[in-house]
Amino acid sequence: MTSQNTDNKGQKIAIITGASRGIGRNTALHLAKQGVDVIFTYQSKLADAESLIKEFEKLGRKATAFQLDIGKSKQFDAFVSQVQHALEAWGVERFDYLVNNAGNALYEPITSMTEAQFDDIFNVHIKGPYFLTQKLLPLINDGGRIVNISSGLTRFSNPGSSAYASAKGALEVFTRYLAREYGSRGITANVIAPGAIETDFGGGHVRNSPELKKMISDNTALGRPGLADDVGPVIASLLNPETRWVNGQRIEASGGIAL
């Protein structure tokens, strides 16, 4: 599924996983306003993906969407082939920016965590980004940018988030190694760590609970939970040429939670 505008001469291209909703969608739209075309993935919400493509068309930019379950690495070869065909259709061979955003939530205490739950979270939040990035690196232009999405939960602890936060912690370490190993190509790699955000992530866990929202507000310097539009612009800014000297860093976009 793709938009119809085919003139891509001189334009930058981003790949964003999980961009049909929430932070990923907001990031994609901010990039579109900066003149960036986007290839993005969605897991199951085709209507959401189609509506994002229409928004790109209104902005005069191109977007292509492919279904992908980031927790199933056996799908990656087929996805990379789809990316290559999409790039060829746009008259290029490589892309510029990769945002590993797709994820899921798990709220489970250590005492009741199952191996299946643990494996699922690690497949989605570290194994998936690790091997998808590995397979896409040959297609990223020298001087490209990688942004991995982590969580404020790697800095502070919230009971029930041990597996999720541990996987995100591994993602942060992986990001530093990406920055070190691919600096010779001028590729930067950084982490954005959102705090509590009102989206439908985790079934709207933050958005739909007045009690949780009050607790977050009371513990956040700016006095409220975050919104997708608080984080998307930060991610987009790290893909901007002006931030080329930021590399191997964890940047928390949380409004000052748990300071």
Image (cartoon, grey):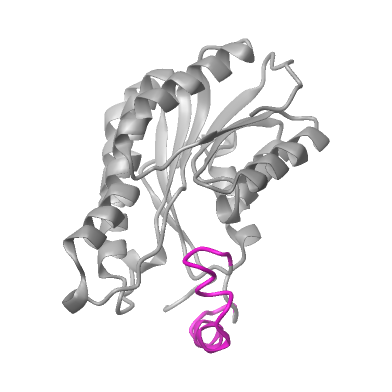
Q: Main secondary structure of the magenta part?
A: loop
User: Residue drawn at (59%, 56%), measured in percent from left and top?
Assistant: 22
Q: Is residue 63 left or right of residue 149?
A: right
State the image coordinates of residue 56 (x, y, percent, origin top left): 74, 36
The picture places residue 140, in percent across and down from the top left corner, at: 45, 22
The image position of residue 27, as x and y in percent, is: 61, 47
Q: Residue 185, position in %: x, y?
A: 37, 21
Residue 7 visible in this rendered orientation of the protein: yes
> Residue at the location (29% across, 74% down)?
108
Position of residue 178 in the picture relative to residue 216 (left or right): left
Q: Does the magenta-highlighted stretch encompass residue 77? A: no
Q: Nearer the viewer, residue 142 or 114?
A: 114
Q: Which corner quadrant of the image does residue 37 belong to?
A: top right
Image quadrant holding the N terminus, namely top right
What is the number of callouts on the image? 0
Position of the C terminus by quadrant: bottom left
Residue range corresponding to the magenta coloring: 199-222
* 63 sits left or right of 19 in the view: right
Between 126 and 237, the one nearer to me in the picture: 126
Res 181 quadrant in image:
top left
Q: Is residue 183 visible?
A: no
Question: Which residue lies at the image location 22% right of the left edge and 59% below the top edge?
Answer: 116
Taking depth in this image into account, of 6 and 219 the one nearest to the observer is 6
**Residue at the location (25% across, 52% down)?**
170
Where 159 sits versus 244, above or below?
below
**Above or below, 248 relative to 92:** below
Q: Is residue 187 above or below residue 248?
A: above
